[in-house]
Image (cartoon, rainbow, N blue to C red):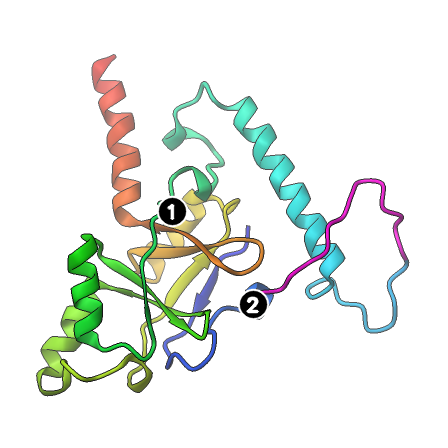
Amino acid sequence: MAIFVSEPGRPIGTRLPESARSRRTPAVTETDEIQKPQPGYNENTDPAFLNAQQVTARRALAEYGEASESSPEAQRPYLPVSRICSTYLYSVEATDTMATALATMDEHGVHHLVVMTEGEVAGLIGLSWLLDWIHRNRANAATQTFTQVELPAFLTATPETDAHQLARLMLAHQLNAALVLDFNGGAKGLVTSTDYLRLYADISRQEGSV
């Protein structure tokens, strides 16, 4: 359920936390024999340990879904991000220009884009940040690429992250979106303040009907 904050920086290589950087882990089963740790063993980087955590997380999500269907989502003590995130993601390359990013947002009707560098996540930008940058750098807006600027800080979470906890961190860091990563560190979805507004608007509408 980890949530990470990537500090502002240029999109040179991935800006994801070390624990989420495209690590492929082998499959494990519940009958695998428990091995003693070897010298230099580290739970934070050991593939078998991390994959076992993923299996446990998936099982917990399944059990949670079966046990809490009767309770409105917004009122559940634990609400996985996977329940509210959008899986529609659009991206630009770090070598693209600001004008290209603005045109991409306009074409697809979105307010956030993932910035990629050689197939790796290098950042997450929003429309407000992009318009502010263009306003402050009008002379270079048409030709400036993302490799030449410092991208804003961004939040990353995983599908089993508690959505309530993520909302608190989004408020604390004054960020209106968070990137959801799969177990291999790939971009899986996006959670925005609009998703939370929709969630609580739905529960308010249900209470009003009652």
Q: Is residue 97 left or right of residue 72?
A: left
The answer to whether residue 56 is magenta is no
Q: Is residue 67 left or right of residue 75?
A: right
Q: Please tell me which residue lies in front, 8 or 121.
A: 121
* Residue 209, placed above or below residue 183: above
First in residue order: circle 2 vs circle 1:
2
* Residue 109, placed above or below residue 133: above
Instruction: Where is residue 166? Give x, y as percent.
Output: 42, 50
Q: Decide whether the magenta segment is chiefly helix, strand or loop.
A: loop
The residues tagged by marks 2 and 1 sit, at their Cα atoms, a distance apart of 20 Å
Local SS, label 1:
loop
* Residue behind mark 2: 21
Q: Amino acid at mark 1?
A: Thr
Q: Please tell me which residue lies in front, 95 or 169.
A: 95
* Numbered mark located on residue 38 in the image: none
Instruction: Where is residue 194? Give x, y as percent.
Output: 25, 45
Report the residue that reaches farthest toward the top.
Answer: 210
Count neighbours of disc 2 (C-alpha within 10 A) and say few if under 14, some if 14 to 19, many if 20 or more. Answer: some
At 72% from the left edge and 55% from the top edge, which residue is drawn?
26
* Residue behind mark 1: 87
Examine the image and state in which quarter residue 145 appears: bottom left
Instruction: Where is residue 30? Give x, y as percent.
Output: 80, 40
At 45% from the left edge and 42% from the top edge, which residue is drawn?
82
Count neighbours of disc 1 (C-alpha within 10 A) and say few if under 14, some if 14 to 19, many if 20 or more. Answer: few
Magenta residues? 22-35
At 73% from the left edge and 50% from the top edge, which residue is drawn?
27
* Residue 183, placed above or below residue 102: above
Examine the image and state in which quarter residue 164 appears: top left
At 15% from the left edge and 72% from the top edge, which residue is drawn?
132
